[in-house]
C-alpha cells in the first residue's frame, strides 16, 4: 500500500511541476511594411492560443534606437525575459525588429526614421490583429520605441488597447545650432555601445555579457535615422494627442530620460486613464538590471487592470 501511495504522490508531483512550468511556444513571423519584410517574434502558451481572441491579452514590444527585439525582451538567462514572464502570465507576446534593424529587411531608400518606423508598427499591429481576430492590442515602447509607438498611437488610437512608455528620451525644446549630421546610413555597433545603457553596480555581469553577445549578433550595425531626427526635429509626439490608457515608467537613475520632462509629458497626456511609476535604483536598461522584477511587476499590473 505504501508503495502505491508513494507512486501516486510522485505522479501528482510531476503533474504539478509540468503544470507550473507552463511550456512557452516561440514562433517567427513576417509582416510587410511599405514593401519590406518586418520580423516579428512571438511567444505564448500553446494551451491559451484559442483564448486570445476573447481575452485580448496581446502585447507588442518595441525596441529602441540601436538594438532589436529578441535580446532586449527575450534574453534567455534565468527569469530575465520579459516575453517569457508575460507569456507565463497568460499573454500573447510579440517583439518587432523595425526595418533596417536585426532580422528585418534593410533598404537604401530611407534611414529608418521615427515616421517610417511607426509605419512598421502599424503593419505589425495589423498582422497580429488579423491573426488573433481582435481590433486592438497593447503596446510597450522602450527608449526611442516610446517615440515610434507614441507616433503610431497618435495616428491609430483605435488600434491600441493600452500603451506603455518606458525610459522616454522626450520633450526637446531646442535643436543643436550646427548639427553634425551622420553621413552614413548605418553605424557600426560594438561592445562599448551594448554596455552603455547599464549602470555600474545595478547589473549582474553574466546577464550583461550575454546581452552584449546576443545584441551584437542581432544588430552588428544600426540605422542612423533616429540620429537625424534628433538633430533636425523637435519632439514628434504630442502628449495631448494620446487618448488611450497609458503607463509611463521612469527609472530614477536613467541618464537618457529626463525626469522633469517626462513628468511634464505625463501631465499633458490626453487620457484620464494614466499612471506614472518611478522605479528606484534603475537605469535606462532596468528590465535587464537587478531590479528587473520590479519592472516586470509594474508592466503586468498595468496590463491586468480591468
Image: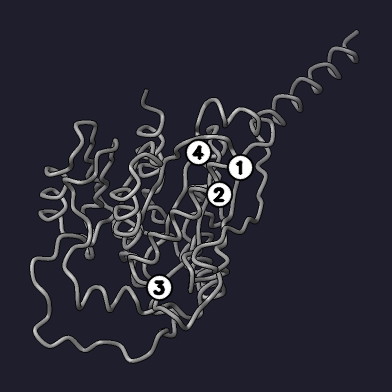
Which of disc 4 and disc 1 is earlier in sequence? 4
* Residue annotated with mark 3: 112
Question: Tag on residue 182?
Answer: none
The image quarter containing residue 2 is top right
Residue at image coords 23%, 73%: 230
| Mark nearer the N terminus (3 vs 1) | 3
Between 108 and 139, the residue placed more toward the observer is 108
Q: Earlier in the sequence, mark 3 or mark 4?
A: 4
Whether pointer 1 and pointer 2 mark residues with C-beta atoms closer than 8 Å, the reply is yes
Dot 3 alpha-carbon crowd within 10 angstroms: few under 14, some 14 to 19, many 20 or more: many
Q: What whole-number distance in Å separates the C-alpha atoms at marks 2 and 4?
A: 12 Å
Do labels 2 and 3 touch, CB within 8 Å?
no
Identify the residue position indicated by label 4 in the image: 58
Real-space CA distance between mark 3 and mark 4, rounded to the nearest whole angstrom: 26 Å
Secondary structure category for the residue under label 4: strand
Q: Is residue 71 left or right of residue 14?
A: left
Q: Is residue 11 left or right of residue 131?
A: right
Amino acid at each position: 500500500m505504501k508503495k502505491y501511495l508513494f507512486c501516486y504522490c510522485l505522479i501528482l508531483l510531476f503533474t504539478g511541476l509540468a503544470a507550473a512550468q507552463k511550456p512557452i511556444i516561440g514562433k517567427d513571423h513576417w509582416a510587410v511594411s511599405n514593401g519590406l519584410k518586418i520580423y516579428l517574434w512571438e511567444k505564448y502558451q500553446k494551451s491559451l492560443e484559442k483564448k486570445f481572441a476573447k481575452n485580448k491579452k496581446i502585447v507588442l514590444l518595441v525596441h529602441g534606437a540601436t538594438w532589436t527585439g529578441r535580446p532586449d525582451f527575450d534574453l534567455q538567462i534565468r527569469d530575465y525575459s520579459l516575453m517569457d514572464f508575460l507569456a507565463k502570465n497568460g499573454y500573447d507576446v510579440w517583439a518587432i525588429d523595425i526595418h533596417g534593424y536585426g532580422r528585418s529587411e534593410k533598404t537604401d531608400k530611407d534611414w529608418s526614421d521615427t515616421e517610417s518606423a511607426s509605419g512598421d508598427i502599424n503593419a505589425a499591429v495589423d498582422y497580429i490583429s488579423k491573426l488573433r481576430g481582435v481590433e486592438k492590442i497593447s503596446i510597450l515602447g522602450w527608449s526611442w520605441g516610446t517615440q515610434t509607438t507614441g507616433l503610431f498611437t497618435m495616428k491609430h488610437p483605435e488600434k491600441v488597447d493600452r500603451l506603455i512608455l518606458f525610459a522616454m528620451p522626450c520633450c526637446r525644446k531646442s535643436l543643436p545650432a550646427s548639427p553634425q549630421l551622420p553621413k552614413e546610413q548605418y553605424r557600426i555597433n560594438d561592445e562599448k555601445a551594448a554596455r552603455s545603457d547599464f549602470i555600474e553596480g545595478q547589473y549582474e555581469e553574466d546577464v550583461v555579457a550575454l546581452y552584449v553577445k546576443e545584441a551584437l549578433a542581432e544588430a552588428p550595425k544600426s540605422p542612423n535615422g533616429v540620429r537625424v531626427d534628433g538633430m533636425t526635429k523637435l519632439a514628434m509626439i504630442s502628449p495631448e494627442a494620446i487618448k488611450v490608457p497609458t503607463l509611463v515608467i521612469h527609472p530614477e537613475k536613467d541618464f537618457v530620460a529626463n525626469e522633469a520632462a517626462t513628468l511634464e509629458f505625463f501631465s499633458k497626456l490626453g487620457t484620464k486613464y494614466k499612471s506614472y511609476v518611478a522605479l528606484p535604483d534603475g537605469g535606462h536598461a532596468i528590465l535587464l538590471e537587478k531590479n528587473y522584477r520590479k519592472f516586470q511587476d509594474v508592466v503586468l499590473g498595468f496590463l491586468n487592470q480591468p
